[in-house]
Amino acid sequence: MKASIQAISYYLPLQTLSNEDINKLFPEWSIDKIAEKTGIINRPISATDEFSSDMGIKAAERLLEEHHIDRNTIDFILFCTQSPDYFLPTTACVIQDRLNIPTSAGAMDFNLGCSGYIYGLGVAKGLIESGIAKNILFITAETYTKFIHPSDKSVRTIFGDAAAATLITGIESPEEQIGPFVLGTDGKGAEKLMVKNGGMRHPFIHTEAAFGEDSLGNFQSSDHLYMKGSDIFVFTLQSVPKLCKELLEKAQTNYDEIDLIIFHQANKHMLEALRKKINIPAEKFYIFIEHCGNTVSSTIPIALSEAIKDGKAKRGDKVMLVGFGVGYSWGGTIIKIA
């Protein structure tokens, strides 16, 4: 039995933040400059009363409907988020009840960001190929925009909210459908992308006195999302080419035998820098970010879903998936399109 991705659907909130909206708030950010630097035109923004579980459920319901999946066949729920509804209970348990998935199903959350989809595929593969589960509903969902300080004009240009739902099923096949994997972690970069307050170590402060302003005029606080973009850029350029090389070696293949490559959709500037450094042909490198923004763990499944719809990834194709970012954490795998 081999784990295989059978279907993907996603959900974007109705509310959006456009480049025109950002320009009105911060006139020094021109509309053209934002688009050129980030590759993003619109970012979906979760409603005030819309949270990760709500978006994940909408993505899952869309998956079940679009692909005619019987929810009673789901025997495990994986939920990847860094913006859970609660500290406890596990949000996956809440989702199981609201989706009316059988109580015989297992359910668990895991906290991981931009590499979360890769890690989730690895966990799903292990559950299926060890015989623990047969049909896994894997949901990624983030409301990062709720972490952003209203006056932090830097990260507001990048992040959007979204959820994606993936059905991973065990099939009879002599060939790997997901894998091999290359994973990595460097916790020394933890503070480069962080919401410091809110956990047990540092409770929320919620006072204006805690706010600070950086050299570029971005207002920040330990209650909000902080990103040291320059350091993350350097980390990415150092780690991702090595990851890709190791993954190809582990799979005993090369770029000629890979049909499509999808990286975490961080921003256009970073993606193009990586593509050129690794020397990936533009026609094999898929970007889907204009109307989503950086949706963290959902960028890869959203892009993969669109690549399949566009005919860029066809049945039997080999697709390299690579995630990297917050943690620092990175991971890559190769999948075969079912």
Image: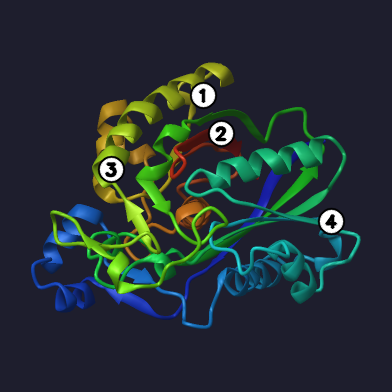
Q: Earlier in the sequence, mark 2 or mark 1?
A: 1
Residue 75's tag is 4
Asked if disc 3 and disc 2 are in contact, CB closer than 8 Å, the reply is: no
* Left or right of 158 in this view: 108: right
Vertical position of residue 228 compared to residue 206: above or below:
above
Q: Describe the element under mark 3 as helix, strand or loop.
A: helix
Q: CA distance from mark 3 to mark 1?
A: 20 Å
Q: CA distance from mark 3 to mark 4?
A: 38 Å
Residue 307 shows in this picture? no
Amino acid type at image mark 2: Thr
Amino acid type at image mark 3: Met
- Residue at coordinates 49% horizontally, 50% vertically from top-left? 300
Q: Describe the element under mark 2 as helix, strand or loop.
A: strand
Q: Earlier in the sequence, mark 3 or mark 1?
A: 1
The residue indicated by pointer 1 is 247
Asked if disc 2 and disc 1 are in contact, CB closer than 8 Å, the reply is: yes
What residue occupies the far left of the structure in this picture? 28
The residue indicated by pointer 2 is 333
Residue 270's tag is 3
Amino acid type at image mark 4: Asp
Q: Earlier in the sequence, mark 1 or mark 4?
A: 4
Q: Where is residue 140 shown, x and y percent of the image?
A: 58, 58
> Dot 4 surroundings within 10 Å: few (below 14), some, or many (20 or more)?
some
Foreground of the two, 210 or 77: 210
Foreground of the two, 19 or 174: 19
Q: Dividing the picture into quarters, in which one does residue 141 lie?
A: bottom right
Vertical position of residue 2 compared to residue 265: above or below:
above
Q: Describe the element under mark 1 as helix, strand or loop.
A: helix
